[in-house]
Image (cartoon, grey):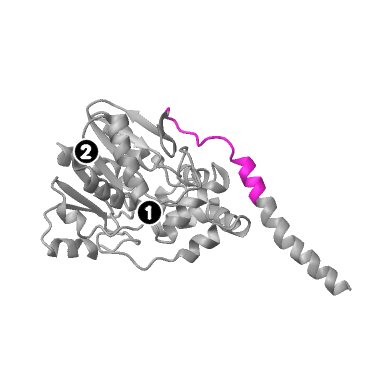
């Protein structure tokens, strides 16, 4: 009898503890993600999109990468400097930041559609575009549907230019679980895990991963409750992948690729393969930079933008 009681208590704890933590986090992060910039709203067909519009000049659209806590804050280190020369637009893509987080099927096509609709409905003219990592795939896919929307593309640490590994839908199935999937996602969104991940996998210089940076990703991964996990689950499962190895070579606009020399997530060999296939593009490497060279070396990035876009 005592053994049975212990088993029942253990089973209750296995349910109660994750449930309590999930509930606490949902209540704690009920307020919108704070920013020193005032965000505007775009009522898109799948939900409200929050974005920044800052500066004067030709329109420059900045697209953040995809991951836990990702949002427009990725571009904070370069926003002020770029706004002196361009009208800068920085949206939180659907499912991220302060934008709506619907429980829908997230795909590269969804994001490509958002990019084109945002350009047409909000900006109203062709744009210069800078896209980070995964969003480079969405940007190139957007061009395929509406090439008239783009003037030039700067792709930062782009993925998909050399294909992808096989999809793993079981990851999504697990993260979608209401109790344990949400609990696992909350662990990955924690301050401790975000600090570890940013220092070990994203940045080259750990000293640049300060408490403010960690807090942005931490809060960004929690605001909106469990709905944060849906696009990330799709991403980790490979459901956002699109092979742009052929499409990128068909772009009829100037393209420049920027790489961090210490990028631990995307192999630079993909760029060499692209060059061997005869695609004509500009290429720059920032030393002592990882996945986000624009964040680690903002002055160099702004200079590159000025040279390429002008």
- Residue 92: where, in percent of width, then height? 40, 39
- Residue 79: where, in percent of width, then height? 32, 35
Please tell me which residue is depicted at 43% across the width and 40% down the height of the picture. Answer: 46
- Residue 239: where, in percent of width, then height? 40, 58
Per the rendered image, the range of residues in magenta is 22-38
On screen, 283 above or below 173? above
Q: Secondary structure at mark 1?
A: loop
Q: Quadrant of the C terminus?
A: top left
Name the residue carrying label 1.
203
Please tell me which residue is depicted at 25% across the width and 63% down the height of the picture. Answer: 162
**Distance from Cα at disc 2 to Cα at disc 1:** 32 Å
Please tell me which residue is depicted at 62% across the width and 46% down the height of the picture. Answer: 25
The front one of 129 and 166 is 166
The outermost residue toward the top is 56
Q: Assess whether residue 146 is covered by the magenta stretch.
A: no
Please tell me which residue is depicted at 54% across the width and 57% down the height of the picture. Answer: 176
Side (left or right) of 22 relative to 164: right
Q: Secondary structure at mark 2?
A: helix
- Residue 31: where, in percent of width, then height? 57, 35
């Amino acid at each position: 009898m005592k053994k049975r009681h212990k088993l029942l208590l253990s089973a209750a704890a296995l349910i109660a503890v994750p449930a309590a933590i999930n509930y606490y986090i949902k209540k704690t992060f009920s307020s919108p993600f704070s920013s020193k910039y005032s965000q505007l709203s775009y009522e898109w067909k799948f939900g409200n999109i929050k974005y920044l519009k800052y500066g004067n000049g030709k329109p420059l659209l900045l697209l953040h990468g995809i991951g836990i806590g990702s949002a427009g804050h990725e571009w904070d280190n370069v926003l002020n400097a770029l706004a002196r020369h361009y009208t800068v637009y920085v949206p939180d893509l659907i499912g991220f930041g302060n934008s709506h987080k619907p429980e829908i099927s997230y795909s590269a096509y969804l994001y490509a559609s958002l990019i084109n609709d945002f350009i047409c409905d909000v900006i109203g003219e062709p744009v210069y575009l800078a896209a980070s990592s995964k969003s480079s795939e969405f940007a190139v896919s957007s061009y395929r549907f509406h090439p008239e929307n783009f003037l030039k593309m700067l792709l930062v640490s782009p993925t998909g230019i050399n294909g992808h590994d096989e999809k793993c839908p079981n990851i999504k199935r697990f993260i979608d679980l209401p109790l344990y999937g949400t609990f696992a996602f909350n662990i990955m969104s924690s301050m401790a895990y975000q600090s570890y991940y940013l220092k070990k996998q994203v940045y080259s210089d750990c000293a640049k991963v300060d408490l403010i940076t960690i807090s942005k990703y931490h809060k960004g991964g929690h605001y909106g409750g469990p709905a944060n996990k849906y696009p990330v689950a799709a991403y980790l499962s490979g459901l956002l992948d699109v092979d742009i190895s052929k499409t990128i070579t068909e772009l009829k606009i100037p393209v420049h690729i920027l790489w961090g020399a210490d990028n631990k997530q995307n192999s630079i060999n993909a760029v060499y393969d692209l060059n061997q296939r005869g695609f004509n593009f500009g290429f720059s490497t920032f030393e002592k930079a990882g996945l986000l060279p624009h964040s680690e070396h903002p002055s160099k990035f702004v200079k590159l933008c000025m040279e390429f876009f002008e």
